[in-house]
Image: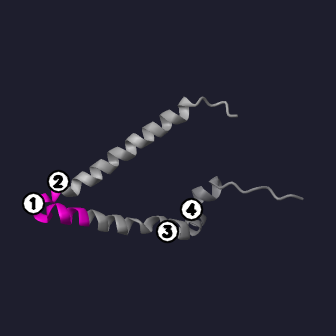
Amino acid sequence: MSDVHWIAPTIGITAASIGIYSIYMAVINYPTDAYERNLGFGWAGTLLGFIGIALSVVPVVLVLKGPQTRARSTFMREAMWEPEEKG
């Protein structure tokens, strides 16, 4: 068992959830409020959907290109943990 009290991760998850929810609500409300007269509710939601589709490529690119990006970074070369060789 860990020596960390159960309330510590609960507080951390709660704070992270509040932050994520706040950002989510701001992103959802912005296109609707900003473009309501020009786009209408339907097109504002569609615009947000297209932005979401475009941003869904980012994790795939990070998974595929992450090792090359980290290899070029001097900070990551110093920060990466490499297991010791046995022998």
Q: What residue type is disc 1 on?
A: Arg
Q: Earlier in the sequence, mark 4 or mark 1?
A: 1
Residue bounds of the magenta highlight: 33-46
Q: Which residue is tagged 4? A: 73
Q: Which SS class for mark 3? A: helix
Residue 7 at x, y percent in the picture: 54, 30
Q: Which SS class for mark 4? A: loop
Is residue 42 found inside the magenta-colored segment of the image?
A: yes
Q: Nearer the viewer, residue 70 or 61?
A: 61
What's the CA distance linking mark 1 and mark 2? Answer: 9 Å
User: Is 87 displayed left or right of 13 in the figure?
Assistant: right
What's the CA distance linking mark 4 and mark 2? Answer: 40 Å
Q: Residues within 10 Å of mark 1 (few under 14, many from 20)?
A: few
Residue 4 at x, y percent in the picture: 62, 31
Residue 72 at x, y percent in the picture: 57, 66
Discs 4/2, front: 2
Tell whether label 1 touches label 4 (CB within 8 Å): no
Residue 13 at x, y percent in the picture: 48, 39
What's the CA distance linking mark 3 and mark 2? Answer: 31 Å
- Residue 35 figure quarter: bottom left
Q: Which residue is tagged 2? A: 33
Q: Nearer the viewer, residue 66 or 51?
A: 51
Q: Earlier in the sequence, mark 3 or mark 2?
A: 2
Discs 4/1, front: 1
Q: Which SS class for mark 1? A: helix
Is residue 86 found inside the magenta-colored segment of the image?
A: no
Q: Earlier in the sequence, mark 4 or mark 2?
A: 2
Furthest toward the left, the residue is: 37
Tell whether label 1 touches label 3 (CB within 8 Å): no
Q: What residue type is disc 4 on?
A: Ser
Q: Earlier in the sequence, mark 3 or mark 1?
A: 1
Q: What residue type is disc 3 on?
A: Val
